[in-house]
Image (cartoon, grey):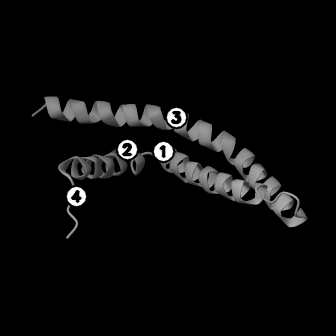
Amino acid sequence: MYQRSPFLNIMSLTNGYFYASFVNNSQNFTICDGNYTEVRYSFKDFLSNWQNISNTTNMTNALNAIADIMATTYPLTYSCYYGIFEAQSTFVDYMYTATQW
């Protein structure tokens, strides 16, 4: 039977807490996360088509993947940048609540 290490359990808990507290609470972080995922998949698609670039269909698909990456660049940078400020605000609220106990 597979058993996870305590370190991985703590990392999973921290990741879940981060998403529940900051990403789901912040519309910008939600957009940032979605655009990051799109860039990651588009880049993987680009690499798979780039390996056989002599084929016209693969060249078109590779260029479409680059266009997808470029289309998400502005929303990605904007939402991630402002998501940091929203996360900071959420963190300050948590700290305020913790000090009022």
Q: Secondary structure at mark 3?
A: helix
Question: Could you say where residue 47 lies in the image, as x and y percent from the top left?
Answer: 70, 54
Which residue position holds label 4? 4
The image quarter in which residue 45 lies: bottom right
At horizontal 45% and vertical 31% (from top left) the residue drawn is: 85
For the N terminus, the quadrant is bottom left
- The span from disc 4 to disc 3 (Cα, nearest Å) is 35 Å
For the C terminus, the quadrant is top left
- Kind of residue indicated by mark 3: Tyr
- The span from disc 1 to disc 3 (Cα, nearest Å) is 8 Å
Which residue position holds label 3? 82
Q: Secondary structure at mark 1?
A: helix
Residue 71 vs residue 96, the one in the foreground: 71
* Outermost residue toward the bottom in this view: 1
Which residue position holds label 1? 29
Q: Residues within 10 Å of mark 3 (few under 14, many from 20)?
A: some
Question: Which callout, 1 or 2, points at the residue further toward the start of the chain?
Answer: 2
Q: Do the residues under discs 1 and 2 have CB atoms within 8 angstroms?
A: yes
Label 1 vs label 4, nearer the camera: 4
Question: Which callout, 4 or 3, points at the residue further toward the start of the chain?
Answer: 4
Which residue position holds label 2? 22
Q: Do the residues under discs 4 and 3 have CB atoms within 8 angstroms?
A: no
- Kind of residue indicated by mark 1: Phe
- The span from disc 1 to disc 2 (Cα, nearest Å) is 7 Å
Question: Which callout, 1 or 4, points at the residue further toward the start of the chain?
Answer: 4
- Kind of residue indicated by mark 4: Arg
